[in-house]
Image (tube, rainbow, N blue to C red):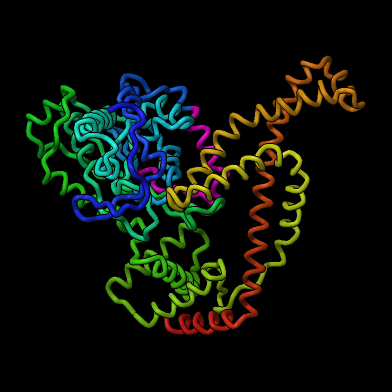
Amino acid sequence: MGEGNQMVFGDDGAKDAHGNPLPVLSKSASKMKIDRLMSTPLPSFQGASPGSRFWSWIATVMLKATLFFQFRRYEVSGRDNIPLEGGTLCCAWHTNGLIDPATIMTTHPKYFVIGGRHDLVTRPLIGFWARKMAVQPVVRQAELIRGGCSEDVAATLNGRSLLKLSTGISHGFGCFLFPEGTSHDESHMLRFKTGPMRIALSAAAMARGNGNPAPYIIPIGLHWRVRHHWRTDAWIEYGKPIKISAESLEQEIVDKLTLGDWCEPPADSVNSLRDELRQRLEPMTPNAPDWETHRAWHLLGHLEGVARRQRPKTWRAEVESARQIREKMATDIDEDRLHKAKETAEILEEHHLDARAISETGEVRRAKILRAPMNFLKLLVGLIMLPFFIPSSGILAIFGNYLGDKNIENEGLDARTSYHLLVSMFGSFFLWPSIALGIVLTSVFVAGDSSWMNTVVLALGGEWITVLLITPILVIMFLLSAYTTVNAWDVSEDIRRAMRRSSLRRSLDGEKVKKLCQELLSSP
């Protein structure tokens, strides 16, 4: 089957072997370029990185810088759970597109051997980086059942990818895989695929055959306040590792895998590991029947924190409080209390607010006037830097928002932040220098007759010296403008939330929220 084979995309009602709906395919995922997939560079495990060490390092630096601006508050915990010896397979639930792997890659100490959806290595821009980092393409059932390629081709591609991922882990590298097999917007995990477990067991067999330390699976909790919002809060939670033993595997399987031949681990070992991983990972997700219930748990976490005088102050503390409510209600559910919490939380949601809007007395909070001077200063600095922001980050923000909103229909809300991430990352690192150079060249050679530019050129000793010196300074100004504008954006969001709280306080809904919250506070 040649390059350019296409399949149906969209919600066509296709189901997997278990009767579950297959994920909706994006336009990109629906285009299978078999020739390019078969020629994907293979990873090497002799050096410090499975792919190009230089490009992998550059990608990590770019991702860290981009995530700095992506989140308003960003906390990582449990990194001491990452074993110093042995490879690590990181597994998490998957609701936020490329943001999910980006946060793992930038907080884990090891270089990664990476497997991903087939179109990651064939897209025009991201494909270059994927191939430099030796990303191995995986064909999902969603593509196979819809006729994207033959079963033989899928088996060849997947078998090769699984073998390389297992080999990388057995050599001590990191890896991340999402057991659900697709990004989604549910409030609970989907059914697990067996691929990550098969890879982990195969890696354990290879490690045993080569005398290397046994690998581990690390469950990771990825917590977003509102996953598709820019400047939302995030908490990355590394859980206790699961050591993968190969003792239950027959020597024949160990020998085949050690020699580089793919061999399927026993189904009972795969299923047992899958069940253990799900049991470990499930509590590290919202694990709610619906988002309404999840919001109610967060509200109750705040209110019970008020009663104990230990109200959560951070996003992590809020998640942990909601987790305690969930565990409590699993054994002792109070339907009336939950119903009141749901009703209150939904009123707040309708006004684009959350449990933080409730005061210690159960009323909707008032604005804090003491913050006004500092907020005014941040807004003023942001306005001053706008002339630098508009031709740099401003253009990227408009383009990223356009792409994110445009592709929601085809790829879902969970893919929106992927476009924001890619545009911000590639645009700032590659377009900013070009934009800065263009502005400086125009100023020096086109508008160079102005007295102030002549003064600059004369002071620096020539036109080209001026270009070489001013261009990097302008790029730095672009970066500073991004930082100051982000601060101003955060202040403007705080002001908008304060205005929404004020509007809610004066409405009938505000009175209802007050009544319900005070009832909940009086009967903890």
Residue 295 % position (x, y): 44, 68
Q: Taking 240 as reference, is 52 above or below it?
A: above
Magenta segment boundaries in residue numbering? 58-81
Q: Nearer the viewer, residue 193 or 140?
A: 140
Specify the farthest residue to the right.
Answer: 451
The residue at 34%/80% (across/down) is: 334
**Residue visible at 12% across and 44% down?**
267
The verdict on residue 70 being magenta is yes
Say which quarter of the image contains residue 454: top right
Question: Count the marks: how many?
Answer: 0
Task: Reply above or below: 225 against 416.
Answer: below
Q: Quadrant of residue 119?
A: top left
Q: Is residue 246 magenta?
A: no
The picture places residue 1, in percent across and down from the top left corner, at 27, 28
User: Quadrant location of the C terminus?
Assistant: bottom left
* Side of 61 relative to 474 (left or right): left
Query: Going by the image, does 166 lie left or right of 107?
Result: left
Closer-to-camera residue (302/128):
128
Q: Is residue 43 visible?
A: no
x and y percentages locating residue 300 in the rendered image: 44, 72
358 is higher (above) or lower (below) than 225: below
Q: Which residue is at 29% across, 45% downward? A: 142
Is residue 274 positioned above or below 176 on the image?
below
Q: Residue at x 16, y 25 (%)?
A: 261
Front residue of 199/377: it is: 199
Mainly helix, strand or loop, the magenta region? helix
Residue 183 visible within the image:
yes
Residue 63 in percent (x, y) is at 50, 36
